[in-house]
Amino acid sequence: MAKPHVPSLSRRERQILDAIYRRGRATAADVTADLPDAPTYTTVRGLLRILEEKGHVRHEEDAGRYVYFPSLPREDAGASQLQHVVRTFFDGSASKAMAAFLGSTREPLTDDELAHLRAIVDGAGKASKAVKRRTAK
């Protein structure tokens, strides 16, 4: 099953979504309190409406207030945003994106991080071979 495409986010939208993920659920007032150099309450409400239109958040009414919560688990939303970056800046190439990321890290990866990455790459290679075998039949 294909993962849903989630539209890209502005810097402020990312900050708002991060505040909601940290809290789990939040009102516009909660989000405003959490933002660095916060815009007006009205601006935050407008951005929450935009995030809802884009499919990033949903809301419920609670005692006359809108309470917002993420529409996707954080990992799924992150994967969608990462796919957008890979398509936009790396011609859709995961290997180009990974090479750029690994080349830009300021601190060396730990042995555990390298082992984890190797396991992911090995698993992706096995999955790719399995798909090729199935489609070749």
Image (tube, helix red, strand yellow):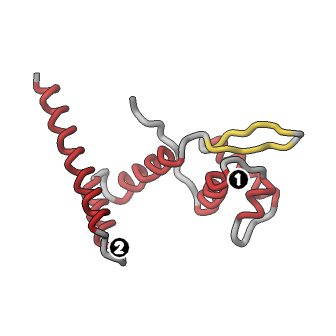
Q: Is residue 54 visible?
A: no
Q: Residue furthest right?
A: 64
Instruction: Tell me: residue 38, above or below residue 107.
Output: above
Q: Quadrant of residue 9?
A: bottom right
**Image position, residue 82 (x, y; %):** 42, 53
Q: Residue furthest top?
A: 137
Indicate the secondary structure of the residue bearing disc 1. Answer: helix
The residue type indicated by label 2 comes to Thr
Is 108 situated left or right of 38 in this image? left
Q: Crowdedness of circle 1 by 10 Å Cα count: few (<14), some, many (20+)?
A: some
Instruction: Tell me: residue 81, above or below residue 58.
Output: below
Residue pictured at 59% horizontal, 58% vertical: 14
Residue pictured at 20% horizontal, 48% vertical: 122
Instruction: Tell me: residue 104, above or below residue 126.
Output: below
Numbered disc in front, either 2 or 1? 2
Q: How many marks?
A: 2
Is 19 situated left or right of 33 in this image? left
